[in-house]
Amino acid sequence: MNASENKNLVLAMVLMLAVWLGFSFLFPPVPKDQQQPAVTESVQQGDVKSEPAAEVPAAAAMEPVVGEAAGVPSTETSAPAREIVVETAKYQAVFTTRGARLVSFNLKDYRETAAANSPPVHMYLAGPDRYATLRTTGSEGFALSGDTPYETSAPEVVEVATNDEVTLSFKHVAANGMQYVKTFVINGDKYTINAGLELRNASPSTLRGTINLAMVQHWDDSSETDSYSFTGPASLIKGKIEEVKIDNLKEGSVAYSQDIGWTSFQNKYFLSVVVPGDKTVQRVQIQRSGDAIENLVESPEITLQAGEQRQLDYLVFIGPKDPEQLKAAGHQLDQVVHFGFFDILAQPLFMVLTFFYSFFKNYGVSIILLTVLIKLLFWPLTHKSYASMKSMQKLQPEMQKLRDKFKNDKERLNKEMMALYKTHSVNPLGGCLPMLVQIPVFFALYQVLLSSIALRHAPFVFWLTDLSAKDPYYITPLIMGASMFVQQKMTPTTVDPMQAKIFMMMPVIFTFMFLNFPSGLVIYWLVNNLLTILQQYFIHRKAA
């Protein structure tokens, strides 16, 4: 083989390796460790005092109020804990008077699996009190335990209509005269909750201290996680999302004290976020306590004179990574919808996909239309490349003559080959170009289909009930492999047997790769192959 053919061979091998190994480099698996030691020391990141975060509306100003604090006796209590169940169109939440915390949160529009009888997604599952989230604690003059008993006059079940807004109010009065009123404003058609804590110094003395709000997430190292998407705590710091691997928390906590936007715990499809309000946050600390991950929002030191009060506000979002819901919530929450290294390509692909879905209400159909659109955009490039390959195939007799003539002079052979290509306007590297150009689009669409909440459990037709999961019967990958074999047979090639064998291996390799890929991605590649076969048919017919 001459130099140009060597390049063609190398490109073919690179093409297969790029797709085969690309996932290992771009989406490396997350290692698992079965040990569960507690956090022992703090490792801080950033020691500059944070600027105030964007102001969140005060929860205490919302109406109507369920369990109005003003009507609750201002005394310590040892009464047993009560649970208040909140029902909205989007979720069911359960609060407890022990610490005025959230103990359970189930999403009504999302199921654990695609099965019709599947239970709803549990963002927080009722269990031991140590797993209850939105825990409030205090220090020094504001000494407050996470298990502190609160009182409320709210009924056991609170139903919030779609267009309504209700405030749950809990009150605790400490022995030193400090009064704490913790409120949650529930909106009937949103995943956001406005949380607030009113501090009132009813004692004759000056009191000072700090307040922490903790988002608590139960964690089990043996739980199955997705190797190609992030699961764990992430915070918006200086306008950029900082992710913390859970395994790293075994070495110590991570803290931020500069330009804090919000802090969250998220997985591939869902997240919980706390956005601290204006003058509410001094530092955010991410730590592990046994089998729980905690995002602590620490307030600056607060000083209250006798009779003085202070309001701390937080915006809480618990729900899906839905771009529209997150954008509506503000505070740059929509930044969590990110498709990795190829995000710049994935975002427009996702927009086009959802645009088609708005008309056809079927993501399978939308993927097919998106594939057609991509093929049309690449049509001139692929047409020129395949035409060049066809022209090069016609040159094979002349190329063989040159090989025979200059078989003992490699340098002269290469020069003559280049001259031959130039004379006939043939690109010897054009054979791999169409596939190489599509690789970034392939990876981008892979991330969209794998990570988008819109594609989760989205059905297509017949047995394909979840486009984000693999084909359960491997029918589409096998058809895709067959179509790729036909495509390779129709693709003009040189007479070099080694190159021909390498190219014919690609359908086999791709078929095995696609067996466990999301079925939506297989549909994309299958339709793309069929369109390529059609394109090659017209090229062959025109050249005949």
Image (spheres, rainbow, N blue to C red):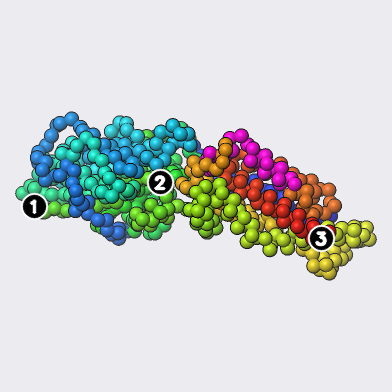
| Furthest residue in direction left, as rendered | 204
Name the residue: 52% across, 47% down.
Answer: 362
Magenta stretch encompasses residue 52: no
- The answer to whether mark 2 and mark 1 are in CB contact below 8 A is no
Residue at which label 1 appears: 307
Q: Amino acid at mark 2?
A: Pro
Please say if 240 is above or below 109: below
Residue 479 visible to an observer of this rendering: yes
10 Å crowding of disc 1: few (<14), some (14-19), many (20+): few
Residue at which label 3 appears: 543
Occupied quadrant, residue 332: bottom left
Residue at which label 2 appears: 320
10 Å crowding of disc 2: few (<14), some (14-19), many (20+): many
Which of the two discs, 2 and 3, sits closer to the camera?
A: 3
Name the residue: 41% across, 57% down.
Answer: 240
User: Mark 1 or mark 3: which comes first in sequence?
Assistant: 1
Name the residue: 16% across, 49% down.
Answer: 199
Segment colored magenta: 465-486
Which of the two discs, 2 and 1, sits closer to the camera?
A: 2
User: Mark 2 or mark 1: which comes first in sequence?
Assistant: 1
Q: Position of residue 11 (x, y in %)?
A: 72, 54
User: Mark 2 or mark 3: which comes first in sequence?
Assistant: 2
Q: How many marks?
A: 3
Q: Amino acid at mark 3?
A: Ala
Name the residue: 74% across, 45% down.
Answer: 485
Residue 230 visible to an observer of this rendering: no
10 Å crowding of disc 3: few (<14), some (14-19), many (20+): few
